[in-house]
Amino acid sequence: MTVFMFILAAAFEVDNSSRTPIIILFTLLFCAIYSFTLGPAAYSLAAESFPSSVREAGMAISVFINSTFLGALLVVYPFVTAPIGYTASLCIFGCIDALAFIACFLFCVDTRDRTLDELQYSFDLPLSIHCAYRLFYVMPEAWKHYSKLVLRFFGKKDGTEDEEAGPSDSEVKWGLVPFHRWAWIEYISTSSRIRCSFNRR
């Protein structure tokens, strides 16, 4: 979405009529990706993030805030665009999208295939632990996984596939340890062992 926003901003700098198909194409792509990702994800995350005792109220407040700021954005955007133009305004929103991606990556807990108890445990942990999980576990694992896929792809393309490259693409399975389990292994159990050894002394 950030990339499409910057492409749209650059398209408005083109003076001739050839920019119209580009603007239409990337506007549709932006809307399509939003409809399948951040659009419904905001509501599902709000429905799963609150404890069961206040889930309905929390969901209602979240939807209210989301709809309020959406309406405010629709009202304010023409006044923002008038003095600075479409290119500058779209660049501003592209930067906001980039910051939102970083914030979601660091702070949004994955709720897929999690029980309510696992979700409650995950949300009870400090955000600093979740940031450490994303920065020091997810990012290195993603780098190793996708670098292997890229090297294997170019090795096949050049006809020089390495025999030690490992299993084929169909056999490669990327299974990350869930956050609640990783936090227990890396922090909770480790701190418990340290506390026990300290008490023994």
Image (cartoon, helix red, strand yellow):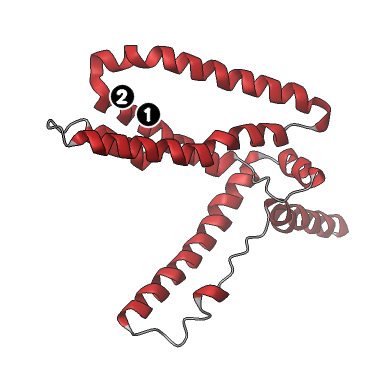
Badge count: 2
Q: Name the residue beneath numbered marker 2.
A: 89
Where residue 75 sits in the image (x, y, percent)? Answer: 42, 12
The type of residue carrying mark 2 is Ser
Where residue 141 sits in the image (x, y, percent)? Answer: 54, 62
Q: Who is closer to the viewer here, 25 or 115? A: 25
Quarter residue 22 falls in: top left
For this orientation, the residue located farthest to the left is: 16
Q: Decide: marks 1, 2 in contact (CB < 8 A)?
A: yes
SS at mark 2?
helix
Q: Which mark is residue 93?
A: 1
Q: Who is closer to the viewer here, 144 or 201? A: 144
Say which residue appears at 80% left-offset and 59% top-offset. Answer: 193
Say which residue appears at 33% left-offset and 39% top-offset. Answer: 26
In this picture, is 158 found above or below 72?
below
Where residue 100 sits in the image (x, y, percent)? Answer: 48, 35
